[in-house]
Image (cartoon, rainbow, N blue to C red):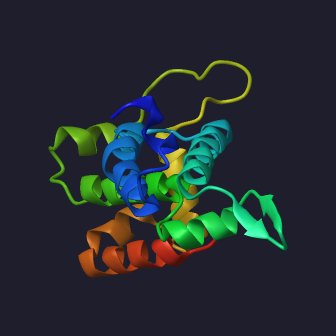
């Protein structure tokens, strides 16, 4: 897929959206399950997605003048979750999956391990676990381990997360 594909006016927006969903977004979000997303990362991902969506759907004529579509209009046309929410949901799904693993599973042991030593002076570095705990707390769940062990409850929590405005 060439750089000029999104600028090609011969392609329908539906085709461009399909290209974005199947080619660009998966490459962009590869490995998001393990990312510790900072606010700056979230901002940059959002900006990138907004640029792509504006390019796909183009401007609109409003009262006889051209104007850029608002984010709300773009996401109504796109009809998908924004990229930051997509990343956070992937991270929650992965956390639930790891919590369901056996106690001797490597991913679970790493997640539940407590590294020794002292943290360096200054602001603590952003950790993956902190992001997951923050997202779970926003959903009103207190204990990630207990919630993930209940498969039906965890699936219900993930469904709530999809519709949750603050996530």
Image point (53%, 37%), residue name? 127
Q: Position of residue 75 (x, y in %)?
A: 58, 66
Judge by depth and name the residue closer to the eye, 80 or 57.
57
Decide if residue 154 is on the left or right side of residue 143: left
Q: Position of residue 103 (x, y in %)?
A: 18, 50
Decide if residue 119 is on the left or right side of residue 112: right
Image quadrant in which you'd find residue 152: bottom left
Judge by depth and name the residue closer to the eye, 57 or 9.
9
Image vertical order of residue 118 relative to residue 24, above or below:
above
Image vertical order of residue 148 relative to residue 112, above or below:
below
Q: Position of residue 6 (x, y in %)?
A: 48, 43
Decide if residue 131 is on the left or right side of residue 40: left
Judge by depth and name the residue closer to the eye, 149 or 55.
55
Residue 166 visible at all? no
Q: Position of residue 141 (x, y in %)?
A: 51, 72
Check the picture and name the quadrant holding the C terminus: bottom right
Q: How many marks?
A: 0
Image point (28%, 57%), residue name? 99
Check the picture and name the quadrant holding the N terminus: top left
Image point (36%, 62%), residue name? 145
Judge by depth and name the residue closer to the eye, 57 or 164.
57
Image vertical order of residue 46 relative to residue 149, above or below:
above
Residue 130 visible at all? yes
Image quadrant in which you'd find residue 126: top right
Image quadrant in which you'd find residue 158: bottom left
Image point (56%, 53%), residue name? 53
Image vertical order of residue 132 relative to residue 48, above or below:
below
């Amino acid at each position: 897929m060439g750089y000029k594909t999104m600028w090609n006016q011969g392609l329908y927006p539906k085709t461009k959206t399909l290209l974005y969903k199947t080619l660009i977004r998966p490459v962009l979000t590869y490995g998001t399950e393990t990312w510790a997303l900072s606010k700056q990362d979230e901002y940059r991902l959002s900006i990138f997605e907004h640029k792509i969506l504006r390019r796909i759907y183009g401007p609109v004529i409003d009262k006889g003048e051209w104007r850029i579509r608002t984010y709300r209009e773009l996401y109504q046309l796109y009809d998908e979750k924004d990229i930051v929410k997509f990343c956070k949901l992937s991270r929650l799904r992965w956390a639930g999956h790891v919590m369901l693993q056996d106690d001797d599973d490597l991913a679970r042991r790493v997640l539940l391990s407590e590294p020794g030593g002292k943290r360096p002076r200054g602001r603590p570095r952003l950790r993956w676990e902190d992001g997951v705990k923050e997202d779970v707390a926003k959903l009103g769940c207190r204990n990630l381990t207990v919630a993930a062990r209940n498969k039906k409850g965890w699936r219900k929590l993930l469904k709530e997360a999809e519709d949750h405005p603050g996530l």
